[in-house]
């Protein structure tokens, strides 16, 4: 199905990574080979290129280089099927970190850098979903990517079924971390009434990155049983539209928005034209801006399906 979707979207590359449900780590069908079912897939998994696919299985990651763009697929489930306790969490080993560091040291700088993995590399324990299933040594990985030596990074992971965007712990070059929603999960009871199945389309414009740093936009759809796939609404995970990468003080940004409102009501697009960085703030930062505009500047934002379209005096 993903191959069909790739063709329909005229995509250049389909790239996957392995999660705990993709491995026969409990040996239900094989008493020793947890990854054999994935290695037997055709076309090659996790990427069509056989050489890169072999590197993924031998080194636990692969590096895909494109003009001004680097994508790494990391197998955080590499040790599932060995020691019994490994199925309870992800891991990146010291040897894998060393190999990744060597490759990045020898690689040319790229404007856009993305790493995909299954397990979350830093804590994600909201909604009572547990604190011990993260990627072991994940923070060391984030520190490596956020060192500033290898450009700026977007890290995309799954596993939690709870869509969320944050910055990793660290300095100003710390990676953006996107916890992706699940496309078609039977959600746990803790999640069932609080999030929806979602998928995200991330758009990164090279010229905008040269101007603002590593920034991007995200358009999110969600599944509703009675309506099918629709633009995401508030309260189900990520909103329909959001961004990432522009680091600022949301309170100060709200002051700049208020200064741009010269009439009683102004179209939000007009504000975006004056302050294009508004497209690249995270959902929680937007909520701070919205709240600050109301409490300190007597301004309210009107939305349609969670997407701002007008701002005016209250």
Image: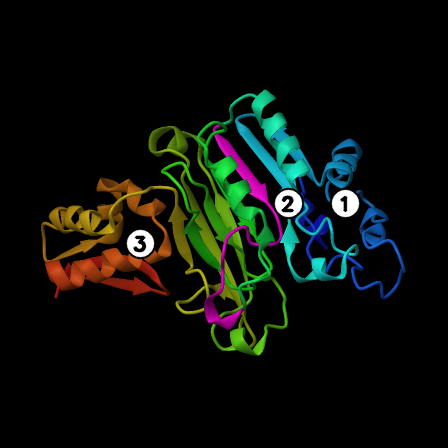
How busy is the neighbourhood of tag 3: few (under 14 within 10 Å), some, or many (20 plus)? many
At horizontal 49% and vertical 57% (from top left) the residue drawn is 123
Q: Which residues are magenta?
A: 111-129
Distance from Cα at disc 2 to Cα at disc 1: 20 Å
Q: Is residue 66 magenta?
A: no
Q: Nearer the viewer, mark 3 or mark 2?
A: 2
Distance from Cα at disc 3 to Cα at disc 1: 37 Å
Quadrant location of the C terminus in the rendered image: bottom left
Count of numbered tags: 3
- Asked where in the image residue 264 lies, by quadrant, the reply is bottom left
Distance from Cα at disc 3 to Cα at disc 2: 31 Å
Q: Which residue is mark 3?
A: 285
How busy is the neighbourhood of tag 1: few (under 14 within 10 Å), some, or many (20 plus)? many
How busy is the neighbourhood of tag 2: few (under 14 within 10 Å), some, or many (20 plus)? many
Q: Is residue 303 left or right of residue 110?
A: left
- The answer, for residue 93, to whether it is visible in the render is yes
* Secondary structure found at label 1: loop
Q: Is residue 114 magenta?
A: yes
- Rendering coords of residue 228 (x, y %): 56, 70
- The answer, for residue 12, to whether it is visible in the render is no
In the image, which disc is placed on residue 45? 1
Circles 3 and 2: CB atoms closer than 8 Å: no
In the image, which disc is placed on residue 92? 2
């Amino acid at each position: 199905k993903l191959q069909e979707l790739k063709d329909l979207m005229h995509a250049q590359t389909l790239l996957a990574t392995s999660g705990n449900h993709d491995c026969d780590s409990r040996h239900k069908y094989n008493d020793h080979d947890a990854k054999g079912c994935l290695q037997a897939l055709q076309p090659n998994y996790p990427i069509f290129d056989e050489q890169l696919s072999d590197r993924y299985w031998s080194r636990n990651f692969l590096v895909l280089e494109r003009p001004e763009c680097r994508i790494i697929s990391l197998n955080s489930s590499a040790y599932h099927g060995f020691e019994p306790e490994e199925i309870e969490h992800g891991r990146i080993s010291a040897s894998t970190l060393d190999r990744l560091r060597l490759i990045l040291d020898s690689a040319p700088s790229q404007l856009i850098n993305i790493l995909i993995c299954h397990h979350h590399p830093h804590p994600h324990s909201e909604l009572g979903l547990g604190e011990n299933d993260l990627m072991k040594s994940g923070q060391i990985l984030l520190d490596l990517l956020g060192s500033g030596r290898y450009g700026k990074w977007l890290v995309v992971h799954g596993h939690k079924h709870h869509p969320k965007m944050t910055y990793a712990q660290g300095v100003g070059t710390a990676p953006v971390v996107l916890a992706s929603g699940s496309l078609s999960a039977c959600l746990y009871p803790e999640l069932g009434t609080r999030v929806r199945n979602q998928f995200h389309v991330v758009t990164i414009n090279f010229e905008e990155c040269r101007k603002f740093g590593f920034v991007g936009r995200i358009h999110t759809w969600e599944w509703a049983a009675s309506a099918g796939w629709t633009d995401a609404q508030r309260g189900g995970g990520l909103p329909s539209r959001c961004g990432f990468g522009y680091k600022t003080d949301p309170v100060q940004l709200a002051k700049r928005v208020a200064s741009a409102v010269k009439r009683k009501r102004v179209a939000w697009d007009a504000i975006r034209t004056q302050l294009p960085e508004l497209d690249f703030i995270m959902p929680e930062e937007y909520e701070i801006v919205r709240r600050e505009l109301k409490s300190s500047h007597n301004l309210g934002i009107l939305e349609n399906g969670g997407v701002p379209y007008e701002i005016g005096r209250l």
